Image (tube, grey):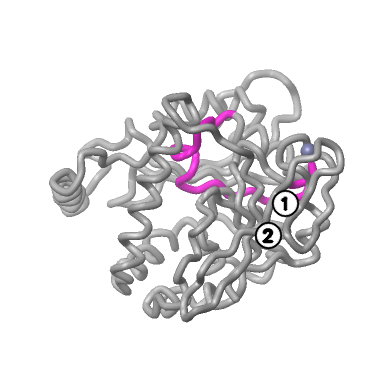
Amino acid sequence: MFVKIDSEVVKLLCCSSCKGSIDIAENGACCRACGLRFPFVKVDVGHGMSDRVLDFRVFVPLGNNRHGLWNKVQLLYESFHIESMKEDSLQEYLAEIESAREIYKEYTLAGRVLDVGGHQGRLRYFLGGDVNLYISVDPFINVFENIGEKKNLLTAYPCLKEPCNFISCYGECLPFKSGSFDWVHIRSVLDHVADPSLVLREARRVICKGGKLLVGLAIMDRYRPEFVSFSGRAVNIVKYLVKGLLRRDIDDHATRFTHQQLLELAAMTGWRVIKQYWQKPPFAHCIHACWETAESCALSNGGK
Ligand SMILES: [Zn+2]
């Protein structure tokens, strides 16, 4: 079993749409207030085994509307994930771990942690005993598909062998009661979502008083030669060319941010920046910032 929903998680759940109370039955959840239904969806996790994922994603119409366009980018992202899972490269997993290690030396998450866009819950690798509840939420409902057969992934991330509290939902519509979490973690996600301001509004709602938000993001105006090592630039150029040869659509991001835009978004959604940490090269364009809820309504672009 790779996916679970602990009883402690069930206590925090609500309707992802109207935030009303829900009932959970054998085949899914149902909102007592608005009547929306959220099914359990079977996911094959490999070796003939399957897990059930509770699907809190609210229906999204396809086509050339805003949601449909987002969906195209999301499918591209999911196809990149599927390709990398096929390779199951131990070297790439270990490089991923090494690149993230410095972030969690700077920030120690504790208490109840919600990982928005948390994928398979790889963040658990970096969490210590101060964390007493971890939940990953992601719209990518099949993210655990065949995970049991990915030997190198499970070797690099032993934490993935432990079942993960996982719910499928959109960051814009979280199925959790207000004030449920001590930390919300949104790393490399704000540039993938359809509406970053709604995601930050929801994060603000589900965080408890005194809680913290850790935002990690690639910043476009820092993506300049002086911030990126020569080898980092060479690797990026080769990746770009190879991907370009294979397909036309190479960018699986829905949005790109400058540093100023991120600060403005924080202020607009009621967050105060309390610390900013820029990663070391070759990821010197990535910021990891700790935010807390602003006490007053005065606009602030602090932490510059
Ligand atoms: Zn409802």
- Mark 2 packing: few (<14 Cα in 10 Å), some, or many (20+)? some
Question: x%, y% of residue 130?
Answer: 69, 66
- Amino acid type of the residue tagged 1 in the rendering: Asp
Residue at label 1? 182
Question: x%, y% of residue 148?
Answer: 47, 77
* Total numbered labels placed on residues in the image: 2
- 133 or 221: nearer the eye? 133
User: Quick check: 35 left or right of 2?
Assistant: right
Magenta stretch encompasses residue 243: no
Looking at the image, tell me whether mark 2 or mark 1 is earlier in sequence order: 2
Q: Quadrant of residue 5?
A: bottom right
Q: Secondary structure at mark 2?
A: loop
| Distance in Å between CA atoms under marks 2 and 1 | 7 Å
**Residue bounds of the magenta highlight:** 176-197
Name the residue at 70% across, 49% down. 38
Q: Quadrant of residue 208?
A: top right
Name the residue at 38% across, 32% down. 256
Q: Is mark 2 within 8 Å of ligand 1?
A: no
- Amino acid type of the residue tagged 2 in the rendering: Ala
User: Quick check: 283 left or right of 233?
Assistant: right
Residue at label 2? 110
Question: x%, y% of residue 29?
Answer: 76, 52
Name the residue at 36% across, 65% down. 85
Q: Is mark 1 within 8 Å of ligand 1?
A: no
CB contact under 8 Å: marks 2 and 1? yes
Residue extending furthest toward the front: 27
Which quadrant of the frame does ligand 1 lie within? top right
